[in-house]
Image (cartoon, rainbow, N blue to C red):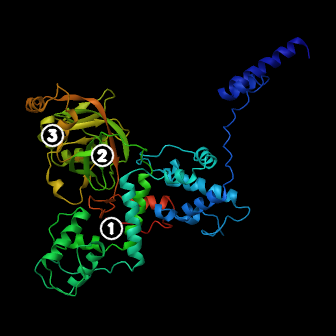
């Protein structure tokens, strides 16, 4: 090939390279350069052999995995006698079982890819192998295994509750109370003995009796049960109370297991000062020095507009906030109302704002704002926040999942004053003056306050008794399905 032919060949090669996608063209042009060696993945530590004593400790912990709401057969190698020695050749199987158990009991059974998009409260990735290798080498395996479950009293209480309700199930559970008209104080009804027997299973203050009279003792037991369900304790066994009492004990066991799993997603140490929202029970609590100092009812998102699980930091309180209406709410609810009843928007304080791209959005003036007088802001991808509301009647309901996803709070002024306490610029008097002035003002918190929006449907009260709520979002069942506890999505953990 002469020099001219060689030159044309080089030009054709260059032109072909330019016609390829850029990444591939680069590979062609630099094909003669030696490729950089791939970065070596860090070697996973070799798990040392377990001594006979360590093997016995490991077998005992894995055998008792059910105490943590887990399944022993998923960790304990087949054919191992919990009371015997480790069979020959089972060292590797036992080590792998320990690794699976450690991961599951500390960070949960779900991989991050399994989490729905609105469950953004997720555990940090964690590899148990290095810690397991060290624990075996340093002969502290049992102490390490005992340290793995969530270090919270709330988790420990659920663990005790799981044992209690499994024992109730082993004893035969409870029988359903027959349907009928509401039962209340002073009545005589053939269903009263069944009600008394049902309540006595969970309530140590009540004894079963064949009496058909709804007496004061039974009335008090019904009130205690209603408080555990989050109901108004009126002592009347209506449809809602009856439905909760007739939940099978097996469903309660599953509900506890689901909530234990969520505890594993929490950080190993919670901030001492924080705002904590339970969207499942619709409650907001402010903690300071790790103690609850202010608690109130809330209204969380309705099914279909679920309040997401998340962690963030509250940075400001907006006093006299306007409401910038989300596009979906405007399109699905407000514009149709305006078309059906012209003038609706102006009568309710809405104004139309033209965006830079020519599109329209709605904003409601602060005087009539659906956000009330306070808005509590924190960054998150869902544009949700806590806020006041001019509609107070919803706080009197038991089922308070009624918002579009944001969280309405029952005591917004008290919460604002508590969050801004210590800032000389925002004394209670100054907050009152700003409210009266009507001007929208953003008050920055002296220090950002962590906020956690959680979903608890089962927890222990101060007396140690288990409290249960409905599963309004069906997230208990969804979690149990995703972790393999439920083989079919048809089984529900709670009536909604």
- x 27%, y 81%: residue: 197
Give the label on residue 384, or none.
Answer: none
Residue that badge 1 annotates: 495
* Above-or-below relation of 441 to 493: above
Label 3 to label 2: alpha-carbon separation: 17 Å
Q: Quadrant of the C terminus?
A: bottom left
- The residues bearing labels 3 and 1 have C-alpha atoms spaced at a distance of 34 Å
**Quarter location, residue 16:** top right
**Secondary structure of residue under mark 2:** strand
Q: Is residue 108 visible?
A: no
User: Is disc 1 placed on a helix, strand or loop?
Assistant: loop
Q: Quadrant of the N terminus?
A: top right
Q: Nearer the viewer, mark 3 or mark 1?
A: 3
N-terminal-most mark, 3 or 2: 2
Residue, disc 2: 276
> Residue sitting at 56 percent across and 63 percent down?
60
- Above or below residue 117? Residue 169 is below
Q: In the image, which is nearer the foreground, mark 2 or mark 1?
A: 2
Residue that mark 3 sits on: 413
Mark 3–mark 1 CB contact (< 8 Å): no
Q: Nearer the viewer, residue 63 or 178?
A: 63
Which of the marked residues, 2 or 1, is nearer the chain's N terminus? 2
As helix, strand or loop, the secondary structure at mark 3 comes to: helix
Q: Is residue 139 above or below residue 315?
A: below
Locate residue 4, reporting x and y percent: 86, 12
Visible residue check, residue 410 = yes
Q: Are marks 3 and 2 in contact (CB under 8 Å)?
A: no
Q: Position of residue 85 (x, y in %)?
A: 66, 66
Few, some or many C-alpha atoms within 10 Å of disc 1 (few <14, some 14-19, many ≥20)? Answer: some
């Amino acid at each position: 090939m002469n020099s001219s032919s060689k030159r044309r060949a080089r030009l054709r090669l260059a032109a072909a390279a330019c016609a390829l996608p850029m990444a591939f063209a680069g590979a062609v042009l630099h094909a003669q350069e030696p490729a950089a060696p791939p970065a070596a993945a860090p070697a996973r530590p070799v798990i040392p052999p377990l001594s006979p004593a360590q093997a016995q400790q490991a077998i005992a912990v894995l055998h008792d995995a059910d105490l943590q709401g887990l399944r022993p057969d998923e960790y304990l190698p087949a054919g191992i006698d919990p009371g015997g020695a480790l069979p020959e050749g089972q060292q590797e199987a036992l080590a792998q079982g320990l690794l699976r158990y450690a991961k599951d009991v500390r960070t949960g059974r779900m991989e991050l890819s399994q989490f729905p998009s609105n469950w953004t409260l997720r555990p940090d990735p964690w590899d148990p192998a290095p810690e397991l290798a060290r624990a075996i080498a340093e002969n502290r395996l049992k102490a390490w295994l005992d340290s793995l479950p969530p270090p919270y009293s709330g988790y420990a209480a659920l663990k005790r509750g799981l044992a209690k309700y499994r024992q109730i199930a082993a004893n035969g559970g409870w029988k359903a109370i027959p349907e009928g008209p509401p039962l209340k104080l002073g009545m005589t009804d053939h269903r009263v003995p069944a009600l008394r027997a049902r309540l006595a299973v969970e309530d140590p203050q009540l004894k079963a009796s064949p009496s058909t009279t709804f007496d004061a003792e039974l009335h008090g037991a019904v009130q205690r049960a209603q408080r555990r369900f989050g109901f108004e304790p009126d002592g009347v066994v209506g449809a809602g109370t009856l439905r909760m009492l007739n939940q099978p004990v097996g469903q309660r066991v599953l509900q506890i297991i689901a909530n234990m799993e969520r505890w594993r997603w929490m950080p190993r140490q919670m901030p001492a000062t924080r705002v904590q929202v339970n969207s499942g029970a619709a409650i907001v609590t402010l903690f300071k020095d790790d103690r609850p100092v202010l608690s109130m009812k809330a209204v969380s998102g309705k099914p279909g507009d679920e309040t997401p699980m998340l962690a963030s930091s509250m940075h400001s309180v907006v006093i006299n906030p306007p409401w910038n209406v989300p596009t979906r709410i405007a399109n699905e609810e407000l514009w149709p109302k305006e078309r059906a009843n012209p003038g609706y928007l102006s009568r309710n304080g809405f104004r139309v704002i033209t965006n830079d791209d020519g599109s329209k959005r709605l904003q409601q003036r602060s005087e009539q704002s659906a956000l009330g007088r306070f808005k509590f802001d924190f960054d998150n991808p869902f544009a949700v926040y806590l806020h006041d509301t001019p509609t107070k009647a919803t706080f009197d309901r038991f089922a308070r999942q009624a918002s579009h996803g944001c969280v309405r709070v029952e005591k917004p002024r008290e919460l604002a004053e508590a969050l801004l306490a210590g800032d000389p610029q925002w004394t209670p008097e100054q907050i009152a003056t700003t409210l009266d002035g009507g001007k929208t003002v953003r008050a920055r918190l002296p220090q950002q306050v962590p906020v956690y929006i959680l979903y608890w449907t089962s927890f222990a009260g101060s007396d140690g008794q288990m409290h249960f709520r409905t599963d309004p979002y069906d997230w208990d069942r969804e979690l149990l399905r995703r972790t393999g506890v439920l083989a079919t999505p048809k089984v529900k953990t709670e009536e909604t």
